[in-house]
Amino acid sequence: MRPRPSRSLAAAAASLLLVSGAAVRADASGGRDPAAARVEALLKRMTLDEKIGQMTQAERQNVTADDITRYRLGSLLSGGGSVPTPNTAASWADMYDGYQRAALATPRRIPLIYGVDAVHGHNNVYGATIFPHNIGLGATRDPRLVRDIGRATAEEVAGTGVDWNFAPCLCVARNDRWGRTYESFGEVPELPAQMSTVIDGLQDGRPSILATAKHYVGDGGTTGGKDQGDTQLSEAELRRIHLAPFRAAVRRGVGSVMVSYSSWNGVKLHGHKYLITDVLKKELRFSGLVVSDYNGIDQIDGQPGFTPAEVRTAVNAGIDMFMVPAEWKRFIETLRAEVQAGRVPMARIDDANRRILTQKVRLGLFERPFTDRRYTPTVGSAEHRALARQAVAKSQVLLKNDGALPLDRRGGKIFVAGKSADDIGVQSGGWTITWQGSPGNITPGTTILQGIRQTAGKGSTVTYDKEGDGIDRSYKAAVAVVGELPYAEFLGDRPAGMGLDAEDLATLAKLRASGVPVVVVLVSGRPLDIAPQLPGWNALLASWLPGTEGRGVADVLFGVTRPTGKLPVTWMRSADQQPINVGDGKRPLFPFGYGLSYRR
């Protein structure tokens, strides 16, 4: 729910409500959907410029309040790292409400809808709860937990005013070289389909925010795992592997679908009418809105900058709202000219607006356009952090254990080392505060080292040295927390080696030389090439990218929680096996679904 608008703003919405009231009364006698009737009444009154404005989504940094009113903009977004100053939940709410006032100053008083990539919690906002990335959630095999995470995320997002989440990613990651592997719940279509329960958490109940199934379709299957590359598959295989999770999302009533940057057999998805209109909208009966990716229409012809041909191709293919962060004015001018020239039919413009406005009506934005400040205190709340800690513990996959785990809480000395041990930024990965993420103390939380110290018994001594210096035989165990530094798509692709870096290997060598049992905690967004080093480790725990609640890792290390996670992807024996997936006949280091536990 959102609070009532102020008296003046309520009066500003009155004329639209009168129209919708008549539509609702007609529904009572004629059996029509009230939301549909309300939208039709509004559409009849809108000009072409107002309709094109609704189809335009600009980046907040590239607009003013006057722009929103003048150009009748239908939507804004914050890209990764695009935040108000200071970056607090209250500042986000104030910013959102200011933009909304500008939208309500337009003649039709149509509220805007504001989108963010809250892909593992409200990850742009300082102090928000950062949940494990999807690859870790896939390891939990727990759709109910994922639904609860969606509900918590909806509360934190709504508490900042934002009403549209560009999540979940329902890609099926088929090549771990891909820099977005961690955004996938797993390598088989059944896993993202099962975990689409996050949509229920985001959209069902109060507050409700719009969920987005992305990236449609096949982005996890590109040749070589290249981001924004070409998925070279038969239609039967595309449907079997990559379309299946979107079918599940549509059945759950997902409100929006985002088109992929990638291509299918050489044709860019942003211009693919067959897949967008014929398959998604007609065959799957998707009734929500289709949104482009960030500057996605620029890529249809392979040249920088969008052209009139690209605009009409994308609109006629079935995209309804266009994420044109900087060049939004040129997009408006171009689309207007294409419609006036008859190259984009008004029926297509009306269909796009119908879909956009219907989602705004269903979200209650016309009646409750402003931030519901009752949810603002939920951002980073103790309740949500407890849920995240539970998710972290359930996501841990124990891959090797010769008796070194669980660690003894009753006393003794534990040595902790590694660049990932005491770093919130590293354990949270990409899409945290900024697009690519970064190492360091970027947001409040509990590092894995802090979690170990909090969980160890009173008689225990925990010593930390990042490089592993100072260890000797007096320690019962050495815990090495190593792995990948933060990255996101494009920059995260690993076309060459997939092993640990020199810093991690040097740290591990020091620990092994001490003769102390070595427990490796691997913080990474995908399986890494670790087979050559594995014989020298006494235990291996795949922690994925756990987010801000590192104590969940410690819970498993000390046996407070028994490990139950199962691999959501096949673990390669060497990088040259990529792509490697269950059923392909290749011999893995650890098979899909593998995961050990502790004896009771």
Image (cartoon, helix red, strand yellow):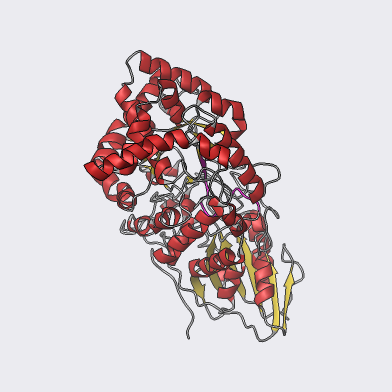
Q: Position of residue 498 (x, y in %)?
A: 52, 52
Q: Which one is in front, 416 or 530? A: 416
Is residue 395 visible in the rendered image? The answer is: yes
Q: Which one is in front, 387 or 99? A: 99
Q: Position of residue 304 (x, y in %)?
A: 50, 23
Q: Is 209 above or below relative to 194?
A: above
Which residue shows up at 30% across the image and 25% down it? 347
Which residue shows up at 72% across the image and 85% down it? 459
Q: Which residues are magenta?
A: 114-126
Q: Is residue 36 left or right of residue 599?
A: left
Outermost residue, top side: 341
Q: Position of residue 598 (x, y in %)?
A: 49, 80
Q: Is 108 above or below relative to 92?
A: above
Q: Is residue 173 left or right of residue 32?
A: right
Q: Is residue 198 left or right of residue 438?
A: left
Q: Which one is in front, 466 or 572? A: 466
Q: Position of residue 231 (x, y in %)?
A: 36, 40
- Please, what is the dominant secondary structure of the magenta stretch? loop
Which residue shows up at 32% across the image and 22% down it? 346
Snapshot quadrant of residue 435 = top right
Q: Which one is in front, 287 or 484? A: 287
Outermost residue, right side: 470
Residue 323 highlighted magenta (yes or no): no
